[in-house]
Amino acid sequence: MYLKHFAQRLARRKYQLMVRRIGKINKSFPVTPTGIAAETGYYWGISAEGVPHHHVEELFTSLEGHAETVLKVLLDDPDWALTPHWPLRPDQRHALAWLHSGHQLRRPIERPPLVPDPFGATKSARKSAPPPRP
């Protein structure tokens, strides 16, 4: 939903983003905001009983759903950062904070960031062992 605001409008109800794969950072290709997806099964897990589940994906979907109305308030405002809806209500800040936290968790620790962290946190994170995959 919110990726549309970062896309180029090509026609009525038609938007395009230029993206890059981590392994091929020098080559970009076009996608629609709804056509962006993560690797299938990346967040799938297996319970202690050996039963496959999608609890993490369900959590991320829930976080995005709760933040959707807040993002609409901010991104659909014609004044953008000068929105009259600032400061956000506590419930809106709460939803946005959870979404941001979810995005931080989504970024695999073993994937180096495209922009270096000025505080050095990514440097130490890269030195640590990656979490085990299920």
Image (cartoon, rainbow, N blue to C red):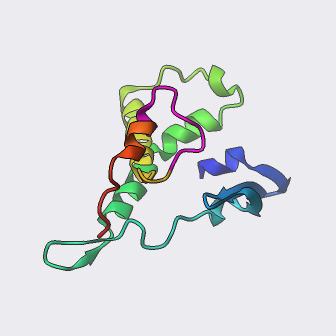
Camera-nearest residue between 29 and 132:
132
In this view, the residue in front, 129 or 109, is: 129
Mark yes or no: residue 96 visible.
no
> Quick check: 54 above or below 8?
below
Question: Majority secondary structure of the magenta segment?
Answer: loop
Give the magenta range: 112-122
Is residue 124 something that shows in the picture? yes
Q: Would you say residue 133 sits in the magenta stretch?
A: no
Determine the residue positioned at 27% across, 78% down.
52
In front: 39, or 10? Answer: 39
Relative horizontal placement of residue 52, taking residue 77 as reference (left or right): left
Farthest residue, direction left: 49
The residue depicted at 42 percent of the width and 73 percent of the height is 41
Percent of width and height locating residue 7? 74, 49
Q: Residue furthest front?
A: 127
Residue 32, above or below 101? below
Q: Is residue 17 left or right of residue 52?
A: right
Q: What residue is shown at x 70% (from left), y 56% (from top)?
A: 19
In the displayed structure, 48 sits above or below 10; it is below
- In the rendered structure, the answer to whether residue 43 lies left or right of residue 75 reads left
